[in-house]
Amino acid sequence: MAVEYAGVEQTHAHISQKVPSKVLFEAVLLAIILVGILMFLRAHPDDTAGGADSYGYVSEALRLNTGHLIAAEHVLTPFGLPENSAITHPLGYAPKGFDETVPTYPFGYPLLMLFAFRIAGFEAMFWVTPILGSMTVVLTYLLGRFSLGPIGGTIAALLVFVLPNYLMSSIAPMSDVPATFFTTLALVALLYPRPSPWTALLVGSAEGFGIWIRPNLALIVIPTAAWLLWQRDRRRLFLFFLGMLPFAVAEGFVNQYLYGAPLTTGYGEPPLTGDLLDAGQRCLRYLQRLNEQQAGVGLLLAGLGFALGQLSTRLRLFFAGFAGLFLIFFSFYTIDDAWWYGRFLLPGLPSIAILEASAIVRLMPLIHQRWFRGICVVLGLAIFSWASIEYSRSHFVFNLGPEDLKYQLAAQLAVQEARQPALVLAMQHSGSLRLYGGLDSMRYDLAPLPQLMEILQHVTQVGGNVYLLADDWELKQLTSGERAVLLAGAKDLGHVEQSHATFFQLNILQPKDLPVQHRLNATFGHQIVLRGYALVPESPRAGRTMKVILYWQALAMPTDNYSVFIHLVDDRGNRVSQTDSYPVDGRYPTKQWTPGYTIVDEHELSIPTTAAGQHVQIIAGLYRLDTLKRLQPHGSSVPANSDYVVLGSFDLPNN
C-alpha cells in the first residue's frame, strides 16, 4: 500500500516515534558513509583546471577573489597592436567590448570554490564537488527514507552513487553535481514529513542558489509550485517564492552587469533545436545511455516504479515529472555527441533513483523468506553496482585526473621552450596556459585567416616569437582546414606523451621575406609554385645528411594531395638517394593550401658514402601517390622535357 506524508495524508509511524538512540545511530552511520564516499571520490582526484569547464570555474573563482569578474586583456598591446578580446579570450570566457572578458559560466559554483579557496587555499577548490557529491548521496537516502523507509532510501542512494555520470561529475571540477546537490536539497525540504515555514524558505533558497549555479534550474520552479498547489498549501508556496526572491534579484543584477540584460547569461542563446524528430531521437539516446550505465535494467526499474512502485500516485507522478522535465528540456539541446552529456540530467537523477528503488521495494515481498529476500536484494544490488562501476572503468572515468594533468604538463613545456616576447596560439589550452604558465595566449580558431596571419606577421616583424600548443585531435582538425598554413615550417619543440599535446614554434613568412638561398619560379600544374629553396649545408659531403628546405606557394586551391620527391642522381640519371613524403611531415596536405600563403617544407636527404667522388644533382618535384604521376613543372630552372626541377649540382669529394 502506498505511503504518504505527515501533514499531507499519512506517514510511517516510525517517523514520528523515533527513539533518540536510533536517530543518533543513524546520524553517525550517515556521517561515516558520507566520509567513506568522499574518500572514494578523492582516491581518484581530478585537480587540474583545463579545457573550458574546469578552467572557467577555477579562474572565475580567482577573479571573484579579486572582486572583479570583468578583466582586461593584455595579449596584443605588447606587440604594438590594439587589443581584440573577440579573438584572444580563452575558453570559458566571452569578449566584452574590445579589450575585456567576462565569464561564460554562472557565478554560483565559483562562489563555492571561492569559500574553499579562502579557507584552505588553491587545492581546496577541487574538494567542493566531491564534498557536495557525497552529500547528494546522503540527501537521496533521506529523500527515499521519507517514503520508502531506510531500505528504500539506501537503495536509492546506492543507485545514485554508482551511476557513471555521477561518478565522473563528482570527480571532475564541474557544476553538474553542485547543481544536483541543491536540487536534491530542495526536494528534501519540499517533501519533508513535518513541513514548516523554515522548510518552505529552504526550498526557495536551495533552488535560488541552484539557479546561481545553473540558470536552467529555473525549470524546477514548475514542479515545485505544482506540488504545493496540489497540496493547496498557498502559505508554503508564498514562502517558497520569498526564499527564492533574493537569489533571483541577485542573478538579475549580475546578468545586467556582465551581459547587459537581467535574463541574459554568459551561455548566450541556448543551442536548442526546433526539430521534434531530432529531439525525440536525442531523448531516446539519453534513455538508452542511462540504461547502459545501469546494468541494462535501469529503464525497466524506472518503468515499474512509475507504474507499480511503493509510492502514492501523487509521488510517482511528481518524481517522474521532475526527472522528465530535465529529459525533455535537454532533448532539445543540440549538444549530444558523447555518453558523458548525460551529466546534464543529473539534477533529475535522485528522482529516477527513488522510482527505481520503489520498484525494488514493491517486488521484495514476493520473496516470502526474509533471509532469502535479503540475500537476493544484496546480491542483485552488488551485481548492479559492479556493472555500473565496470562501465565507469571501461569509459576511463577514474583516469580523468591523469588525463587532465596534460594541461599542467603542456603549460610547463611551453614555459620551458618559449622565448620572450612570446605569443602562444591555442584553443583547448588557451586558459591553462595563462593559469599554469603565465603566458599570453591567443585563440587560433576565432579570427578570419587573413586577419590572423596579418597579426602573426606583425608580431614576428617586431621581434616576437609565435608558438602553437595543440592536442593531437586539434592538429588533425588543423591539417584538414585552411589553418593548416600555421603548421607550414613549424618547428616541433616537444611532445609530452602524457598530455597528447605538441608545442610548435611557428615560422610566419611573407613571400618577400623568404630567407632562401636560391630563388626559383617553377610552377607545377598551374596550381603550385616553388618560390625557392635552401640547402643546409650548401656544400654536402658523402656519408652526411643535408637539409633541403622548399618554399611553396599555392596559386589556386590544389585539386589533389601531392607528395614531394627529392632525389639525388648521378651523371647517368641513376638514383643515389631519395626522400619522398607529403609536405610539412604530412601536417599540411596540398589540398588544404590557401592561395597567397608561403609553405615552408623541410626534408632531410641522406648522402651515402658510396657517392664519394661522383658528380650529383638534387632534383625535386610533386606527384600523386596513388598514380605515381608527376606534375609537370614550368620555369627557367626546369630542364627541357623534364618533370622535375634541379636544386643544385655538386662534386662530392672523396673523404
Image: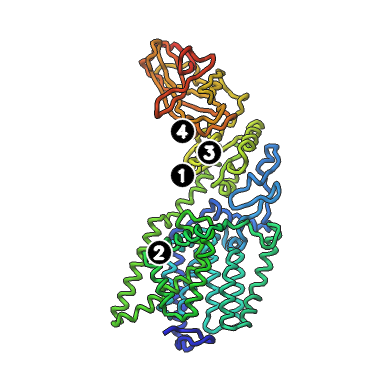
Q: Is residue 217 left or right of residue 542?
A: right
Q: What residue is shown at x 48% (from left), y 44% (from top)? A: 473
Q: Which mark is residue 500?
A: 1
- Residue beneath label 4, please? 586
Q: Which amino acid does label 4 sit on?
A: Gly
Circles 4 and 1: CB distance less than 8 Å? no
Total numbered labels placed on residues in the image: 4
Amino acid under label 1?
A: His
Which residue type does callout 2 highlight? Asn
First along the sequence among labels 1 and 3:
3
- The answer to whether any part of residue 126 appears in the image is no
| Disc number lying in front (2 or 1) | 2
- Helix, strand or loop status at disc 3: loop
- Circle 3 is placed at which residue position? 481
Who comes first in sequence, dot 2 or dot 1?
2
Tell me the distance, in whole angstroms, between the alpha carbons under discs 1 and 3: 21 Å
Please report whichever mark, 4 or 3, sits nearer to the chain's N-terminal start. Answer: 3
